[in-house]
Image (tube, grey):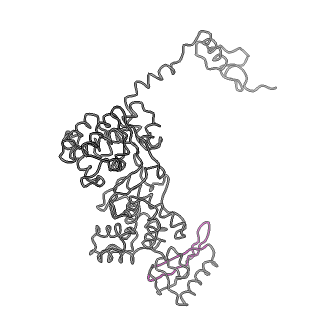
Amino acid sequence: MSSRSFKVRFYDTEVYKGKRKTTYTVRWSVNGNRRGRSFETSALAESFRATLRVAANNGEPFDVDTGLPVSQVAPAAELTWYEFALQYIDAKWPRISANNRKNTAKALTKATLALLRAELPGRFDPVDVRRALREYAFNNLRRDEAPPEVRTILSWIGRNSLPMTAWEDTRHLDAVLRALDTLLDGTPAAASSVRRERRILNVAIKYAVRQKNLTDNPLPTGKDEDAAPRVAEAVDKRSLLNPGQVAAVLAWIYARPRTGHRLHAFFATLYYAGLRPEEAVALRVGDATLPAEGWGQLLVHTAEPEVGSQWTDDGQVHETRHLKGRAEGDTRPVPVHPALVATLRDLIEADGLKPGGLLFPGEKGGLLAGSVFRRAWNKARAAVLPEHEYNSPTGKRVYDLRHTCLTTWLNNGVPPAQVAEWAGNSVPVLLATYARCVTGQLAALQERIEGPQRLPPVSPEQRDRTQNFGRFSGRTSAKSRVEPVPTGLPPSTPGSRPGLGVPRNRTR
């Protein structure tokens, strides 16, 4: 709750006589903090002043943050930002994904630390404070399990959190925006992270407006200079791998003991079929149609993103989700290259996989962990690629195998609508993401439009008509210009048309 005080003092009403109008400002202080409110008439100012004095004479406490009697304080002043954030996370928790829960907790943590009355005490480590907010206060599943040291931190934050009216003060709004734009060490945050956290915070503020905790949304939008930074949507061409690089990396991974052949098949699936990593780890043997010869098919219907056990309802590291951008229960068929068909058939035979089992199980039989395949991929890049390529964006992320696959499809003439269907994207998103990566088709495209855009030669009859048109319109060359007809008036005579010798205005 916001602090209150009975220490109220009133001052003389200030009168300001400007060129256009006169204003009357009521002055008073609450607990030493001076306040003021201006009115256009003396009567309104005295009425407001009388209301304040009556409340003070009746022994009513005044709110320190707003300077108003408690009976006049808006609900936003009674509710602190920290209290609202807890209510918001509890309301949203059942309806958002585990990954969204984690990102929401991060955004709310930064905003909460920016909306404090005082600096954090020296006895609190800033890292511990952020962890207490992110992993306990804004985690509906773990809040009641917070250890004593975390409860101490959260208790202090609860007492020192500013009320919701702080959003109406540009100083506090700017502080929140700065917190979203920077990391704990003061360095700038990635533009994609800033954009995501501003979007999350914007949804929270809209919820506050619907709940009557705020009157409007103060966050900047559109072309405002404080709006979220632009994020590059297109894939960096430098991150794509060529077939030789992919072959070398996969060969190194295949030679690893125990799980090398399985990781080799996993990465090959991303390269040949363009699946997202969370879709590939969820594949079952029965989802793959693998004929002895020719092309096969994968039926993708589930994703298993890795978000952490503290954010999922069942306490598992992975969260079972439907496909991205599709309705629950929807499926997506993806063609399987003959080389990948052979690789997957060998994997199933070597590991004795059953139709109902995972196609790429982890070493202990569960889902393949992201830390495992990311570590293997990084080691393979370091072992195979030259130092300058390893330090470059080339294949830096496992996800770059998917980018390489989709780019290969587009560059070899597969229609964007078909690529979008196989990849699980919309056509606009696909084109915006991979437009800079489509290469190798310029010569063919230029040849395709070279003939249709070539202008035919002009016949002598058409040339004569063009010259005659120019003769009457005045847009002819100096050689074909017709001399003016004598009229008895010099060209410079007022009222005449220069060069034609015809008066500009004639009486009708």
Report x, y in % for residue 425: 44, 44
Q: Is 396 situated above or below 100?
A: above
Give the image location of residue 317, x and y in percent. 32, 59
| Quadrant of res 152 | bottom left
Does residue 26 show up magenta in the picture? yes
Q: Which residues are magenta?
A: 15-39
Q: Quadrant of residue 335?
A: top left
Relative to 233, does residue 188 appear above or below in the rendering?
below
Residue 411, compared with residue 356, is above or below; it is above
Point out the image quarter for the N terminus.
bottom left
Q: Quadrant of the C terminus?
A: top right
Residue nearest the observer in this picture, 428 or 303: 303
Task: State the residue at coordinates (58%, 87%).
Answer: 54
Of the pair 101 and 216, the residue shown nearer to us: 101
Residue lying at the far top in this picture: please name it.
460
Foreground residue among 36 and 21 = 36
User: Residue at image x 63%, y 75%?
Assistant: 41
Please, what is the dominant secondary structure of the magenta stretch? Answer: strand
Residue 487 on image: x %, y %: 73, 16
**Whether residue 36 is situated above or below residue 228 in the rendered picture:** below
| Residue 331 belongs to the span the image colors magenta | no
Residue plotted at (35% across, 31% down): 294
Task: Give the farthest residue toward the bottom.
Answer: 58
Residue at left 29%, top 51%?
A: 361
Q: Is residue 122 left or right of residue 203?
A: left
